[in-house]
Amino acid sequence: MRVTLDYGKTGLDVELPDDNIVGPLAIRPAPPLANPAAAIDQALLRPTGTPPLTQLTRGRRNACILVCDITRPVPNRVILPPLLRTLEEQGISRRDILILVATGLHRPNEGAELVEMLGEDIAQNYRVENHHGKVLEEQDYLGTTENGVPIYLDSCYVRADLKITTGLIEPHLMAGYSGGRKVICPGIAALETVKVWHGPRFLEHPKADCGFLEGNPVHEENSRIAKIAGCDFIVNVCIDGQRRITWVGAGDMTLAWQQGVRFVEGVVKVPVPEPCDVVVTSCAGYPLDTTWYQAVKGLTGALPIVKQGGTLILAASLTEGLGSPEFQRLIADNPDLKVFKQRILGKDYFVMDQWQLEELAKVVERCRVKVVTDGLPAETLRRCHVEPALSVEQAVAESLAQYGSKARVAVIPKGPYVLPYVA
C-alpha cells in the first residue's frame, strides 16, 4: 500500500505491506465551507452566547486580538479581515487595534513569518506584537488560583478595552483540545504561570491527555485562568486534512468553543479493534513538524493504540532542529529519563520546557520509538531517547522481523490531527 504521510511542506510517500495495515486512520470527511469569509461574517452577526460584535464594539476605545503563533495552521488570513473591518466600521481606529501573537513561551514571529500567518496587508498595515512570556515586566498579576497557580498575563491584553481571541480547535496532548481558553493560557501567560500549570502535579494526571476535558486538570485550570482574564468575543475554526475551514464559531469563549469541540469530536475520533504492534505516524507536516519539541505531539497522539512494548515510527522534517535553546539543554542534561522523572517530581525543581520531555517519557516508557527525518543526525536522535531510521519502510521491516509476519501496523498519515482509540 502506498501512503503519503504529512511531512514538511511536501509530504513523504511510503510503501507499506498490505497484509499488515490497519487503516490508514484518517479524520472523517467533513465538507469544507463553500464561502468561509461569508461564514465568518455570519458568525460575527449571529454569535453564540454574546451580542453581535458590532454591538460589543460600540463605545470601546481600543481592542486587542489574540492570534496563535506560526506553529499552528490557523487560517488568520480568512479570520482577521472581517474582524478588523467590523472594529474599524464601529469606530475603533486602526492605530488602536493590536494584534498580539500568543507565543506562549515559544520564540517571537517576525518578518516573513508574520506575512505568512496574517497576509501582507495586515502584517504591514496593522500593529502586530509578540507576547514575551519570559519578561515579567510585560505582564499583569491577576492573583493566584485555588490550586496555587500564579496568574501573570500579557498587560496589553489584560488592559485592552475590547478583548478578542481567535484559534483552531484540534486534539491537544495535555489540554484535551486546543482553541478557546488556550490562546490565553498558555498563549499570553508568563513563565511564572506556565511552570506551575505545566508542572507534573497537573501533567501526571491520567486525564491530562488528548480528547479528555471532564476531569482533566490542565483544561480545568486554564479555563479558570482564562475566565479571570476575561474575553469579550471569540472566533474559532475547525479545518480538514487539506486545512480548509469546515466549521466556524464565534461569541462566548466557553459556549462557542464547546460547540466546536463537539464538531471536532465527531470528526477526529477513529476506533481500532485492538492495540497494534506498530504505529506509523507523522506530526501533521509543516508547521508543526519543524522541531523535535513540537514533533513529540505526533508520538503522544498515537500512543493510545500501540501495544505495551510495541513500536512507534514517526516521520517528521525537523527543519529547525530540536527547538529552543532551553529544550536543547534539557535533553543534553537528562540522558536518563527515569532520573529526570524523579527530578521533576521533587520539590521546587523546574527547568524550562520540562513538560515536553515529560510527555516524551510517557511514550518511551510504553514503547520503542523510531524516527525518520532529514533534519537531525542519528547521534542527536539517540540523545533524544529514540532510534534513528533511514526510512519508514526499513523501520517497518525491522519491526515485522521483531514482532512476526502477522504483526498489525496502523498508519496515521496526519498524525495528531487524528484521535485514535481502542474500541
Image (spheres, grey):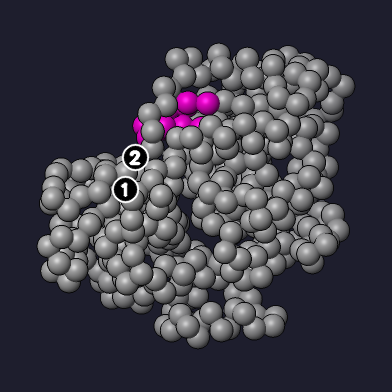
Report if residue 114 lies within the magenta region: no
The type of residue carrying mark 2 is: Ala
Vertical side of 248 occupied by 180: above or below = below
Residue in view at x 58 percent, y 59 percent:
207
Vertical side of 175 occupied by 169: above or below = above
* Magenta range: 238-247
Asked if one can make out residue 406 in the rendered structure from this viewpoint, the answer is yes
**Residue picked out by circle 1:** 412
Label 1 near label 2: C-beta < 8 Å?
A: yes
How crowded is the residue under tag 1: few (<14 C-alpha within 10 Å), some, or many (20+)?
many
Q: Which mark is residue 26?
A: 2
Percent coordinates x, y for residue 3 in the rendering: 20, 43
Asked if one can make out residue 57 in the rendered structure from this viewpoint, the answer is no
**Mark positioned earlier in the residue sequence (2 or 1):** 2
Where is residue 106, by image quadrant?
A: bottom right
Q: In terms of secondary structure, where does tag 1 sit?
A: strand
